[in-house]
Image (cartoon, rainbow, N blue to C red):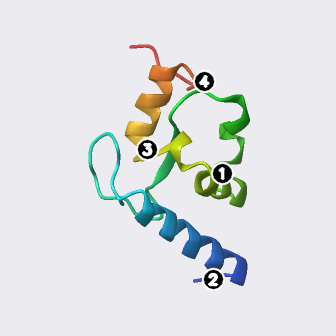
């Protein structure tokens, strides 16, 4: 297994702290989330806080600076919320 770089280790440490600060559970289904399963979902549609920086320092920095603009969710609940807000671009017809 490839060893993590110092940058990756720091990013994971910060991301873990943000997950704890958000309560560690999905806002939709109350499932316990980990670094690998947690996603940060926009509370409202906002051009300034778009999804272009998913999984990056920019995103985690935005979440830390503006926690009231985000919720933490599992992938399924994140998609459901984005579809409801009309920001999920690859909706599947039901």
**Mark 2 or mark 3: which comes first in sequence?**
2
Query: Is 83 on the left-hand or right-hand side of 33?
Result: right
Identify the residue shown where x is 60% and y is 24%: 89
Q: Say which label, 1 or 3, has the lower sequence index.
A: 1
Marks 1 and 4, Cα distance to the nearest angstrom?
Answer: 22 Å
Gap between marks 4 and 2, in whole Å? 34 Å
Mark 1 neighbour class, 10 Å CA radius: few under 14, some 14 to 19, many 20 or more: some
Point out the frontmost of discs 1 and 3. 1
* Rendered residue at 70%/47% (across/down): 53
Q: In the figure, is residue 37 to the left or right of 57?
A: left
Give the mark nearest the N terminus, 4 or 2: 2
Q: What numbered label is drawn on residue 75?
A: 3
Q: Along the line of sight, which residue is nearer the eye, 86 or 20?
A: 20
Alpha carbon distance from label 2 to label 3: 26 Å
Residue tagged 4: 89
User: Which residue position holds label 2?
Assistant: 2
Residue closest to the far top: 94
Residue displayed at 63% across by 86% down: 3
What residue is pinned by disc 1?
62
Whole-angstrom CA distance, mark 1 to mark 3, is 19 Å
- Residue 69: percent from left, percent from top: 55, 40
* Cβ–Cβ under 8 Å for marks 2 and 3: no
Mark 2 crowd level (few <14, some 14–19, many ≥20, 10 Å Cα): few
**Helix, strand or loop at disc 1?**
helix
Residue 36: x and y in percent read 47, 62
């Amino acid at each position: 297994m490839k060893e993590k770089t110092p940058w990756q280790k720091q990013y994971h440490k910060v991301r873990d702290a943000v997950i704890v600060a958000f309560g560690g559970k999905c806002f939709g289904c109350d499932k316990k989330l980990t670094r690998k399963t947690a996603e940060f979902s926009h509370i409202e549609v906002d051009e300034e806080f778009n999804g272009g920086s998913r999984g990056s320092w920019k995103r985690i920095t935005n979440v830390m600076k503006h926690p009231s603009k985000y919720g933490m969710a599992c992938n399924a609940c994140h998609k459901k919320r984005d579809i409801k807000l009309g920001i999920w671009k690859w909706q599947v017809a039901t």
